[in-house]
Amino acid sequence: MPALLLLQEVRQTLGTMALGPITLRVSAGERVAMLGPSGAGKSSLLRLIARETRPASGVIALDHRPLDQWTPAALARRRAVLPQQHGVAFGLPVELVVALGRVARQGDAQQDHIVHEALAQAQAAHLVGRRFDTLSGGEQARVQLARVFAQAWDERDGLLLVDEPLAALDPGLSLSLMDAMARFAQQRGHALIAVLHDLNLALNHFDRLWLMKNGRLIADCDALPSTLPLLEQLYDTRLRLLRDAHGIAVLPMGLTQRELRA
């Protein structure tokens, strides 16, 4: 399939760590989970793809056009970003926070309807009328997810970039919002790229895995149980795989590869 997103020999310097070179391609509709230990460069790579930072060298292209050739308004309509931090400087109403995802659209007659639909899909309709700064971390995450939905609502074959989207949520809500995110992307043909630490979410809800360590991409592979040895190498720990009719689960065994070799 043609590439919606293309990275060619992308490099960046992050303090004492070098990121890259990284060459990757993503097609419309794909779901990619980025995995790796803390400090591996996952969030830094996501910020490059979002054009929040610029690569030192190499090219990142969206829909066959280099990112630096996109106007901010046009880029805002084709890609939406859910960052790790959800803070807003002022006590804005929830509906206004979600509506911020629509600022690139002039004369938006459907804004109120889309804002409320996006809140419903993010399981945050009950937060209408609340102030964002009074919400819990999990509630803020839901509202920001609704903002991303509102931003990408009208587009086809767009790009959703999310950085640890479910870290503040309980397990049941994490699963339901992951399903909502995947369903939203599938309905519109959006590619979904997510930085995750939860191996079970990655293996059960994504098509591909990007495995990163020390600023390097060590594998680009399908999200299958056969990746278990790669995941053990990535996290330097022994993992146990469980499987039933509902999916798979990966459990850490607590022994590093060095201990196993000893």
Image: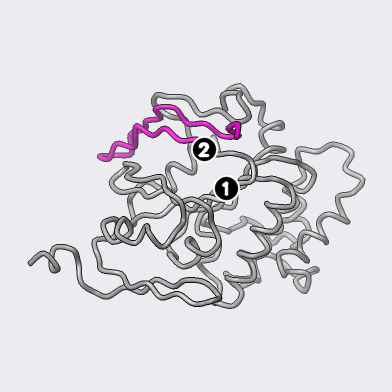
- For badge 2, the amino acid type reads Ile
Give the residues drawn in magenta, as a range: 1-25
Which image quadrant is residue 119 in?
bottom right
Image quarter where the N terminus lies is top right
Question: What numbered label is drawn on residue 161?
Answer: 1
List the single residue furthest toward the right.
109
The reply to whether the C-beta atoms of the residues labelled 1 and 2 are less than 8 Å apart is yes
Q: Residue 17 location, x and y as percent?
A: 27, 40
Q: Secondary structure at mark 1?
A: strand
Q: Residue 22 location, x and y as percent?
A: 38, 34
Characterize the local packing of mark 1: few (<14), some (14-19) or many (20 or more) Cα atoms within 10 angstroms: many
Q: Residue 205 location, x and y as percent?
A: 55, 61
Question: Which residue position holds label 2?
Answer: 49
Which image quadrant is residue 227 in?
bottom left
Residue found at x 44% / y 48%: 43
Q: Is residue 7 magenta?
A: yes
- For badge 1, the amino acid type reads Leu
Give the side of residue 155 with respect to residue 185, left or right: right
Q: Is residue 161 magenta?
A: no
Dominant secondary structure (helix, strand or loop) of the stretch shown in magenta: strand
Of the image marks 1 and 2, the number of the one nearer the N terminus: 2
- Separation of disc 1 and disc 2 at Cα? 8 Å
Asked whether 52 or 207 is in front, the reply is 207
